[in-house]
Amino acid sequence: MVKFTIIYNAEERGYSGKCLEIPEAISEGETLEELKANMIDAIILSIKSIVREAQENHSRLMIIEVPTT
């Protein structure tokens, strides 16, 4: 399981959020639970789009591990 950080704000009609690690992933929801579900979808779609674009440009992928301490 991968963890992502969501920066969110209370809005007039719920919440809006943006993923710190993937700024292209943004969404909103009437409740925090709805925002969470919508952010998961936004992150998945953003990653698929980034990978597809990399493949179309014949880019190579590298997996790295970043320490958290």
Image: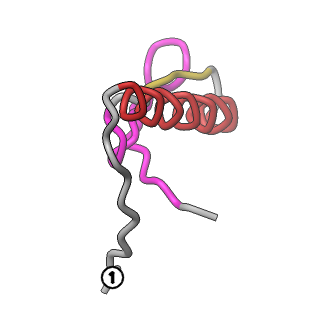
Q: Which quadrant would the N terminus be assigned to in this image?
A: bottom right
To which residue does mark 1 refer? 67
Q: Position of residue 11 (x, y in %)?
A: 43, 20
Rendered residue at 38%/52% (across/down): 61
Q: Measured from the top left, where is residue 24 in percent x and y? A: 35, 28
**Quadrant hosting residue 65:** bottom left
Please give left or right for residue 8 compared with residue 37 in the image: left
Residue furthest front as drawn: 58
The percent position of residue 41, horizontal first and vertical second, equals 63, 31
Residue at 50% across / 26% down in the picture? 15
Q: Is residue 4 above or below residue 11?
A: below
- Specify the amino acid type for callout 1: Pro
Which residue ends up furthest to the bottom in the rendered image? 69
Q: Secondary structure at mark 1?
A: loop
In this rendering, position of residue 59 left or right of residue 11: left
Q: Is residue 67 above or below residue 36?
A: below
Up the image or down, 5 lies above or below 45; here it is below
Q: From the viewer's perspective, is residue 28 above or below residue 8?
A: above
In the foreground, 55 or 19: 55
Q: Residue furthest top?
A: 13
Residue drawn at the location 40% of the way across and 40% of the way down: 19
Local crowd size for mark 1, using a 10 Å CA cut-off: few (<14), some (14–19), many (≥20): few
Q: Which quadrant, please, contains the C terminus? A: bottom left
Percent coordinates x, y for residue 9 in the rendering:
39, 32
- For residue 59, what is the image quadrant? top left
Q: Which residues are magenta?
A: 3-23
Q: Is residue 20 magenta?
A: yes
Q: Which residue occupies the foreground of this view, 66 or 35?
A: 66
Q: Which residue is at the front of the view, 55 or 39? A: 55
